[in-house]
């Protein structure tokens, strides 16, 4: 995206957030939008790794959980302020991802999928079994809400605004990153590692760095989730969550910043809309995903853009 | 400038190069010719750090390259134009070129990179015309030029070219060879791997003939062009001509 278009897109997005934050007053809708925002962060984090650098991860729920449990443990067991826990949790997620990513990302394709799958399972087992710290299968309650000045940011209007401001900043940053020297190297990596290396890119290191960056964004989503909902349990950070994140990226569109927003919205809203099918809900859900993949294999963003261009060129 | 002594290497347990030696002096174009599977590309991969396992000695400017990763070798001044071009199809032409300057941009040499970009555009005007287009829609010849341009963006002192003319129309082949000659005059050194032995040897100063992992012939390029063995095996002359010529 060129500088002008980026500015325009960011302004429009900021405007939409401002309007929505004032217009949406129904608590259910506010909550839904908050969840979409958190999922967008998850999808964006994974998209940087999957869409741009071409490396799959089936274990990102571990980093989501690390963000949530990290801040949960520090604030409830040790009485830290959330803002003190914030940098530590993000740095921890980045460091853990780098250390694990360096050897794991030597794998590729199916093998990398298996390796990261293992990571996700280990994470989930720790969240579930480390009773004294994580509360085990019944989860953690009483995680304090975030406060800015005297204002408590909780589920509702304030939490929704907080999440979307973070999303906006993450979008802006990732968009810049993709257009930079690093972004070019990432896209090259996704295409051919040998060719990227021949251009002077240290592929092993870059893969670990982007894995780490993606983990930080994911942990950030976990941090927000823990403090907004106030309650976390291992089932929110299981294998299915990792799969849901991959689905958001693929449905929204690989290597597309705004695709993360679409993917997260669809995957979050679809189950809500499909309640009318009651017993058949999950079947219809699966069917919708199949149809999207068959007819829009490059994801919703690319598919919709192509359709628009088709209409334009016909008229 | 580049010295290779007794290089052995391959893929897994299969050894492709059985002790190969070769040298390239500053300002030379050295052609390495041989049939498919002789090990030409493997040799280039070993020099550029893309071959994980090899033994022997490879020295660039007297410095051993053993154990060095590709980015370090690029930083020393060895550029590779890989076989099959290896460009990045969805990225624009200019992004492909800028990627070549990855290490230099990391050092913050933005001005130098922009100047280099202009130089590449001057060498390959077609790339300037198509700079905003995705590299994947370029023709084969244009992609080859892009791959060369990208390697030049690393500001190499020596360029390793792996079959730059394979699959190109004769006119384009000539064009590529002209550009190599021009760059040599601007004091760039080349190790040129080719199946098109005729064209490569006509351009080169010296040549080597690689056969199933062993160097079978070497010498001045002009002498190799006249060599009966080379003619028979690589220049595609009619076998009969030789048999009858000898009788």
Image (cartoon, rainbow, N blue to C red):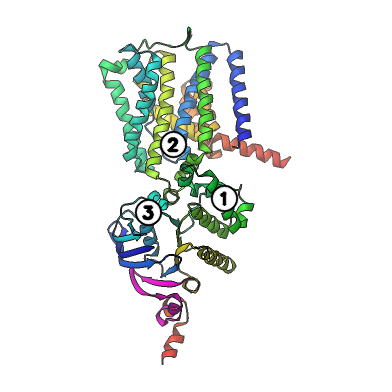
SS for callout 3: loop
Which label lies toward us, 3 or 2? 3
Dot 1 surroundings within 10 Å: few (below 14), some, or many (20 or more)? few
Give the residue at mark 2.
Answer: A49
Residue B247, percent from left and from top: 41, 92
Dot 2 surroundings within 10 Å: few (below 14), some, or many (20 or more)? many
Residue occupying image coordinates x 64% and y 52%:
B129
Q: What residue range appears in magenta?
A: B204-231
Q: Quadrant of residue A225?
A: top left
Taking the magenta stretch, the answer to whether it contains residue B229 is yes
Label 3 with label 2: CB-CB less than 8 Å: no
Left or right: where A59 falls relative to B81: left
The disc at residue B214 is none
Check the residue under mark 1 and report the chain it is in. B
Residue A90, percent from left and from top: 39, 25
Label 2 with label 1: CB-CB less than 8 Å: no
Give the residue at mark 1.
Answer: B115
**Residue A292 in view (yes/no):** yes
Q: Is residue A71 above or below residue A151?
A: below
What distance separates the C-alpha of mark 2 from that of mark 1?
Answer: 32 Å
Residue A8, percent from left and from top: 63, 29
Residue occupying image coordinates x 35% and y 55%:
B51
The answer to whether tags 2 and 1 share a subunit is no
Which is nearer the N-term, disc 1 or disc 3?
3
The front one of A26 and B63 is B63
Check the residue under mark 2 and report the chain it is in. A
The disc at residue B50 is 3
SS for callout 1: helix
The answer to whether tags 3 and 2 share a subunit is no
């Amino acid at each position: 995206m060129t500088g002008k278009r980026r500015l325009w897109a960011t302004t429009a997005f900021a405007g939409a957030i401002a309007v929505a934050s004032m217009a949406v007053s129904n608590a259910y809708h506010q909550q839904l939008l908050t969840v979409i925002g958190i999922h967008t962060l998850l999808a964006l984090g994974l998209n940087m790794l999957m869409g741009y650098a071409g490396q799959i991860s089936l274990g990102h729920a571990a980093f989501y959980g690390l963000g949530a449990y990290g801040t949960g443990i520090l604030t409830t067991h040790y009485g830290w302020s959330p803002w003190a826990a914030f940098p530590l949790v993000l740095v921890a997620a980045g460091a853990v991802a780098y250390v694990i990513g360096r050897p794991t990302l030597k794998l590729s394709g199916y093998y990398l999928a298996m390796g990261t799958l293992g990571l996700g399972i280990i994470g989930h087992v720790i969240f579930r079994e480390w009773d004294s710290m994580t509360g085990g299968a019944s989860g953690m309650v009483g995680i304090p809400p975030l406060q800015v000045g005297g204002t408590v940011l909780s589920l509702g209007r304030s939490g929704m605004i907080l999440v979307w401001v973070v999303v906006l900043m993450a979008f802006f940053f990732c968009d810049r990153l993709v257009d930079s020297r690093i972004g070019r190297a990432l896209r090259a990596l996704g295409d051919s590692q040998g060719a990227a290396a021949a251009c002077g890119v240290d592929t092993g290191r870059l893969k670990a760095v982007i894995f780490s960056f993606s983990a930080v964004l994911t942990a950030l989503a976990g941090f927000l989730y823990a403090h907004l909902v106030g309650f976390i349990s291992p089932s929110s950070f299981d294998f299915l969550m990792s799969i849901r994140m991959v689905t958001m990226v693929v449905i929204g569109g690989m290597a597309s910043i705004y695709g993360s927003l679409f993917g997260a919205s669809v995957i979050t809203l679809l189950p809500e809309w499909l309640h009318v099918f009651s017993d058949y809900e999950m079947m219809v859900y699966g069917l919708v995903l199949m149809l999207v993949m068959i007819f829009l294999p490059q994801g919703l963003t690319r598919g919709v853009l192509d359709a628009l261009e088709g209409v334009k060129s016909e008229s | 400038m580049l010295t290779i002594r007794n290089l052995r290497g391959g893929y897994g347990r299969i050894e492709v190069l059985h002790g190969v030696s070769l040298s390239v002096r500053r300002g030379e174009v050295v052609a390495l010719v041989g049939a498919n599977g002789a090990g030409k590309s493997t040799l280039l991969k070993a020099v550029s750090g893309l071959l994980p396992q090899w033994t022997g000695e490879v020295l660039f400017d007297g410095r051993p390259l053993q154990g060095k990763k590709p980015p370090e070798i690029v930083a020393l001044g060895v550029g590779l134009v890989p076989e099959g071009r290896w460009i990045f199809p969805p990225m624009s032409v200019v992004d492909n070129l800028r990627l070549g300057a990855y290490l230099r941009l990391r050092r913050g040499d933005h001005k130098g990179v922009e100047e280099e970009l202009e130089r590449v555009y001057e060498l390959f005007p077609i790339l300037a015309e198509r700079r905003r287009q995705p590299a994947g829609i370029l023709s084969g010849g244009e992609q080859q030029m892009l791959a060369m341009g990208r390697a030049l963006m690393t500001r190499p002192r020596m360029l390793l070219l792996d079959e730059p003319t394979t699959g190109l129309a004769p006119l384009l082949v000539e064009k590529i060879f002209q550009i190599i000659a021009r760059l040599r005059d601007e004091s760039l050194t080349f190790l040129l791997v080719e199946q098109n032995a005729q064209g490569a040897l006509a351009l080169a100063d010296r040549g080597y003939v690689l056969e199933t992992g062993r160097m079978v012939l070497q010498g001045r390029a002009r002498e190799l062009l006249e060599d009966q063995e080379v003619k028979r095996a690589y220049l595609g002359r009619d076998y009969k001509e030789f048999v009858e010529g000898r009788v």
